Image (cartoon, helix red, strand yellow):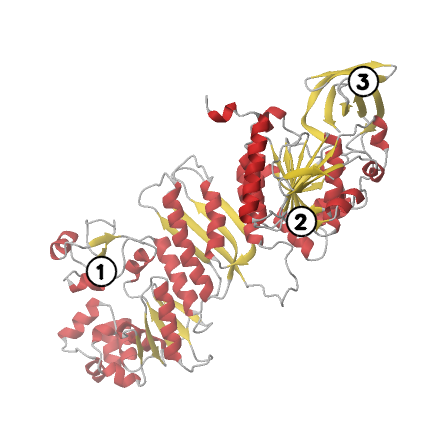
Amino acid sequence: MYAVLQLPEFHLQSALRLNPCISWNDPVALTKEGTAQGTIQQVTPNARKTGVYPGMSSSAALARCPQLQFTSTTPNTEKHTQSTLLQISRNLSPFVESTALGICTADLRSVFQEDLHFVLKEIIRALKSLNLHARAGLANDPDIARIAASTGSPICEVKCNADFLKALPLSALTDSFATLQVLSDWGICSTADLLRLPKQQTLERLGSEGHRLWTLASGGRARLLLLEKDEHVFEECIEFEHEIETSEPLMFAVQRLLESLIKRLLYATRVAEKIQFKLPLEEGDPYERIFTIPSPTLDIEVLQRILFTHLESLQLARRPTAVTLNITPTRAKHAQFDLFQSALKDPNRFAETLGRLEALVGVAHVGVPSPGNSHHPDDFTLLNAVATFESMAHGGLAPQCIQTTTDQPNFGIPLRRLRPPIFAEIEMHSHRPHFIKSQLLAGPIEESRGPFRVSGNWWEKQWQIEEWDIHVSNKDILARIRRDALLRWSLEGVY
Amino acid sequence: MSLALNIQPSENTQRMEALRALITERYGTARPKHFRTLLRTGISKWDSITGGIGQSATTEICGSSGNCALLLDVILQSASQQGILSAIIDGGNSFEPSDYNALLRNEMLWVSTLTPKSALQATDILLRDGNLTLIALDLHGFGPSDLSKIPASTWHRFARLLEQSNSALLVFNSQPLVEGCMTRITSQSKWSVKALGARRSELIESLPLQIFKRNTHELRLV
């Protein structure tokens, strides 16, 4: 048994799928430009009811239906629609063929075939929730199932191929106008008439198309399906008619894309692990950003907050012409009761908070500090807090921090470092600092401790940096000063 | 000139007493809030008097830069040992990670800010988040003139946020600043250069602490 899912008026449905302003139930026509110019390519059922048909000129169509709206589609949009159709149809069977644009065939021979009608209804309902209106056909031949799908409303099951085909007009079997015209001239109007013709002579006169038609009319040929690999590509794109200048319409478009992608993930039983956000600009390279979801989820509010927090502070030099979201899916994590509990109560919320903090103070000023693998003063890197806290919850230290656990500073008072250090003039007396003069601190040095010779790199010949701890008596302040390799003094920090 | 400006301080106090008496008569005696202890600091005097750092409340620590840094180290170390995630909002970008206990670096978020406004905004964001339990706001990097511009309502807003969460807020500052804090610790000892070579545990033990605890209306020295 084979099932075929078909999206009638595929190009038009692709154009309307992510358009919140026009629906499938409105009278809409597809033209090349998306305006009332040129020839109409496809129409919605309600436009057809008013007498508007493909092939008409736009002006003639408007004369018949003044409420008619026009739209256009792009290859990208159609690609994503086809991908959506394939992903949803994988709920029927893992063996799926992308037969043509808007048509996919599922091989049901090796899958459980109970309640197929119910499953197909659910799939059609799922596609409808994604703003796609589908029809389905069931037959024991893929080509017959395709013909059944084109006549289905919404599901058509073929029990006996011969009986089903007998009643069909020839136009249901082929789109070739030339072949139909020749057959019509011969007085052949139905499949039953066609089967009365001898096969060999039909083939000689009509060529390969005639052969295909005859074979189909005689009950089909069990062809092999060209199966599609399940690549789990969850990508959606909206191309703007005009470049946008503010973040509100962009947020609206992002929300629309996210809603569609989340529904697709839901039907594929996956959750979002990463979101790639791409904005092609009117000039130059596109703007790209990847958001890692700390705790993979399908919660639209969480994903929306992560994206919107970024968009609120986003400033671009050029206007975006489109927006693309690509979600990397993963399987949802399940933990038994509190086993493998996270260190953070809500990792996604925390990631969002980090985003807000980064927007407030800058990316370089937020993180978990980890000392660098050197003895350079003020050498540290900032680790991602979510990843570090999460790795801690699963059994210990972040890899970058393991090296530092042995040298715990248990002496003295922690320093408050001045970033950048302040230039200072130091008077020396008996090889010890005697007086300091700087922008922050000036006065006689009552006590000093040092010199502590340090060097960031052990392979250097000399310990070139010299540090002193000093007590400035008139201010009663403890401070650290440093002399570098060029004999310049600076105030490093205060205690 | 308004009437309020003519009121003498003694008159003001009398009015306040009268108002309190009226409230007590109508609604009964106000009871001090009982805060649960979030973290025992490891400093015996502090822990014996207040039980440690209170949950859902603000603790203000006033003192010289070095004293506050020592107390911060002790607190963060205790938090680290108890598996409490903490954050330090470093006013003035002066926090030196290598001078603090290495283990705790894994469990501490560092947010360095350059203005009091951004420091307070970062505190607000973290308090609303609720993922981190201990939030330390270090205002030592800012001058008194900058800090005097912080409106008192900020601390009340933080108090309201804390009431809704299990977090604790520590504010480190040179002078008392936080109105409505549950506990205020002051420590004004001076150090000599020799202290820089002494064991940190010995320095903590010799640190003179004055502990003020809120008793219904006001902070009282305990």
In this view of the protein, can residue A100 be seen by the observer? no
Q: Chain of mark 1?
A: A
The three-letter code of the residue at mark 3 reads: Ile
Q: Residue at x 17, y 77 (%)?
A: A189
Disc number lying in front (1 or 3): 3
> In the displayed structure, would residue B18 be above or below residue A486?
below
Labelled disc at residue B13: none
Are the residues flagged by discs 1 and 3 in contact, CB closer than 8 Å? no
Q: Is residue A480 left or right of residue B184?
A: right
Which chain contains the residue that carries disc 2? B
Compared to A38, does A416 lie above or below?
A: above
Q: Chain of mark 3?
A: A
Q: Is residue A327 left or right of residue A354?
A: left
Task: Give residue A482's position: percent from left, percent from top.
Answer: 77, 24
**Location of mark 2 (residue):** B85
Residue at the image position 69 percent from the left and 34 percent from the top: B95
Could you tell me the amino acid type at mark 1?
Val
Residue at which label 1 appears:
A43
- At label 2, the amino acid type is Leu
Q: How many marks?
A: 3
User: Which SS class for mark 3?
Assistant: strand
In the rendered image, is residue B37 in sight? Answer: yes
Q: Quadrant of the C terminus of chain A?
A: top right
Q: Residues within 10 Å of mark 2 (few under 14, many from 20)?
A: many
Residue position marked by numbered label 3 in the rendering: A445
Name which quarter of the figure residue A462 lies in.
Answer: top right
Do discs 2 and 3 share a chain? no
**Location of the N terminus of chain A (image quadrant):** bottom left
Q: Residue B178 sits in which quadrant?
A: top right
**Residue A190 locus on image (x, y percent):** 19, 79
